[in-house]
Image (cartoon, grey):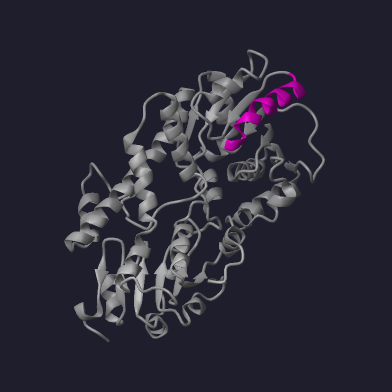
Amino acid sequence: MRLEIHGSELAAATAAAALSWVGHQVHWVPNASMPWSSLLEADWLRREPDLMAGLQDGRELGTLTVAGSDTPQSGPIDILWLALSPEQRDEAGELVEQAAARHAGALILVNNSTFPVGETERLESRLGAPERRAVALVDMLEEGRAWASFTRAGRWLLGCDDDHAEAQVRELLRAFNRRQDVVQRMPRRAAELTKLATIGMLATRISYMNEIAGLADSLGVDVEHVRQGMGADSRIGYEYLYPGCGFGGPNFSRDLMRLANVQEASGQHSALLEQVLDINEQVKETLFRKLWIHFHGRLEGRTLAIWGAAFKPGSARIDHAPVLTLLKALWAQGVKVRLHDPAATAALRAEVGDQPLLELFDADPYAACEGADALMLVTEWKHYWNPDWARLAKQLREGLLLDGRNIYDPSHVASWGLSYRGIGRRADPAQTSSR
């Protein structure tokens, strides 16, 4: 099939790479706000596993052309695919009209953008002919594994009110829907609302567990026992029950705000969602409060090592990441920060600029711990999971480890002579056998 894909989001890049990989003829038009030349330099795109290789393969095969770099494909298209950011909603309608005017005959619009509920129907009205239909294909990519989540999708959520349009989309995705049928069809507005409602539910579970972790702390209970007990209940399950130092990311946070806006626009204010968002912002300061309490508020002049800045492992982005809130609080107290992240230091430097209280490392995580009083884990990159404990015990002058993701065993950490503080978990050297 012949496609024209618009957008500079991760969803647009992934669709362009994956659909051209399986033989579709794809012309990708990045948004003017981030043209192809800028995308080539974007850390978040270059570090996405397999994605740049997929884009390169498509261009070498001749199944993918990119506006601003290659000669556009000529002739009509079958599919117009939109993967724009929510902020680009206003230009979407005009873009659809322009594309519809360039191409005669039948046309299917695939709205892969997270727009307000009902936007797919409004975009269909801009196509200009009754035989041209629009569908909502919900963006369900996971940053850090976008290629895998597109090419081996667990499900495709398709908002569609027309059988012919459904058949066209199924043919488009046939290569990724072979082992079992993972296309779930429902009305367009239902699909659009399902995406936002799902994000709201996941955020609610995370925030609830963070509330329980705070309660466990005050009662002297290890929240891990509580998490295991709750997850064993078949009505609840284990997914998204991990307490931590807050969630972030360009899509998760943005979609939550989109859901809040949808509710406000409908006249149905959500006290629950407002509380979820408030809890998340408060939790981002949890590690700072634990540091403050441990040192009795005497933080000025101290040095802190931080492992992780990205909003999640596998990403180079720091949008709404907990580390931003932590850094502001630490610098306000005159704390010097030595931070390691394997991917996100460039994004952090661009965000905070030259800061005399910040030193960045992207090679050796132990280099960040030299001369540090304590270590704070913020992002659970896999190579942080099993550190050299003997080396850390010698490096950390005050022997304090703050675990913002509860990835370490408190007793094991304490057995090395370190004081452990997690989210709803703790252990001191005196509480366990020393080495």
Q: Residue 413 appears at what percent x and percent y?
A: 31, 76
Q: Is residue 73 magenta?
A: no
Front position in the image: 203 or 229: 203
Decide if residue 225 is in sight here: no
Numbered range of the magenta stretch: 87-104
Q: Is residue 103 magenta?
A: yes
Decide if residue 4 is in sight here: yes
Q: Residue 335 appears at what percent x and percent y?
A: 45, 72
Q: In which image quadrant can residue 289 be found?
A: bottom left
Q: Is residue 70 left or right of residue 79?
A: right
Q: Is residue 313 left or right of residue 206?
A: right
Q: Residue at x 63, y 24 (%)?
A: 108
The answer to whether 218 is drawn above or below residue 433 in the figure is above
Q: Residue 415 appears at what percent x and percent y?
A: 27, 80
Q: Residue 178 appears at what percent x and percent y?
A: 51, 38
Q: Residue at x 23, y 41 (%)?
A: 235
Q: Main secondary structure of the magenta part?
A: helix
Q: Quadrant of the C terminus?
A: bottom left
Front position in the image: 217 or 233: 217
Return the residue found at the far top: 130
Q: Is residue 2 left or right of residue 264?
A: right
